[in-house]
Image (spheres, rainbow, N blue to C red):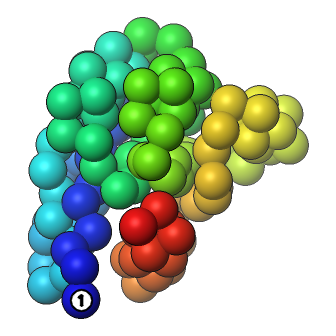
């Protein structure tokens, strides 16, 4: 089985740490980079070319939508998973238009996050 390489980007330090811990526990998933804002996420995605980028919707530097657009342009093989506390239709529609492949609301069980990362990682391979 091929390892799924993941970039995590969230402005909340605790969320970044928990996501990294949850994903790093999986033998077939490797977190290759962690970012605090959209600018850093874009730079790291271009450098590491992860299979999956997990992006917070509302973070400094233009948010997840800007990061998703730029990552889709610079690393088109990267699938994008939005991870947000917000589940409103406007946020979801804006992210879909920006290239987000899947959208999860913070608070879902960790198993759902792992399943989504695996599914997206397989689809981008």
State the residue lying farthest toward the bottom.
1
Q: Position of residue 48 (x, y in %)?
A: 19, 39
**For mark 1, does the 10 Å Cα neighbourhood hold few (<14), some (14 to 19), or many (20 or more) residues?**
few
Is 41 placed above or below 19 here? above
Q: Is residue 37 visible?
A: no
Identify which residue is drawn at 24% across, 60% down: 5
Q: Nearer the viewer, residue 105 or 96?
A: 96
Name the quarter where the N terminus is drawn: bottom left
Q: Is residue 5 visible?
A: yes
Q: Nearer the viewer, residue 25 or 6?
A: 6
Identify which residue is drawn at 27% across, 55% down: 6
Q: Position of residue 94 (x, y in %)?
A: 77, 31
Image check: 96 left or right of 99?
right
Q: Position of residue 121 (x, y in %)?
A: 41, 68
Name the quarter where the C terminus is drawn: bottom left
Image check: 7 left or right of 119?
left
Count of all numbered marks drawn on residues in the image: 1
State the residue lying farthest toward the top.
61
Q: Nearer the viewer, residue 89 or 72?
A: 72
Write down the residue under mark 1. 1
Is 28 placed above or below 56 here? below
Image check: 65 left or right of 112?
right
Identify which residue is drawn at 44% across, 75% down: 122
Identify which residue is drawn at 46% across, 81% down: 115
Is 81 placed above or below 55 here? below
Q: Position of residue 54 (x, y in %)?
A: 41, 49
Is 6 placed above or below 55 here? below
Helix, strand or loop at mark 1: loop
Q: Quadrant of residue 74?
A: top left
Q: Nearer the viewer, residue 59 or 64?
A: 64
């Amino acid at each position: 089985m091929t390892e799924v390489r993941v970039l995590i980007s969230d402005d909340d330090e605790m969320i970044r740490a928990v996501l990294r811990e949850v994903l790093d526990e999986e033998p077939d998933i490797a977190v290759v980079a962690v970012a605090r804002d959209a600018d850093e996420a874009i730079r790291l995605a271009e450098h590491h070319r992860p299979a999956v980028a997990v992006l917070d919707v509302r973070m400094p530097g233009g948010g997840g939508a800007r990061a998703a657009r730029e990552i889709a342009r610079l690393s088109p093989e990267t699938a994008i998973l939005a991870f947000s506390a917000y589940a409103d239709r406007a946020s979801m529609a804006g992210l879909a238009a920006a290239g987000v492949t899947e959208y999860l609301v913070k608070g879902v069980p960790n198993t759902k996050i792992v399943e989504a990362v695996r599914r997206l990682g397989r689809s981008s391979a």
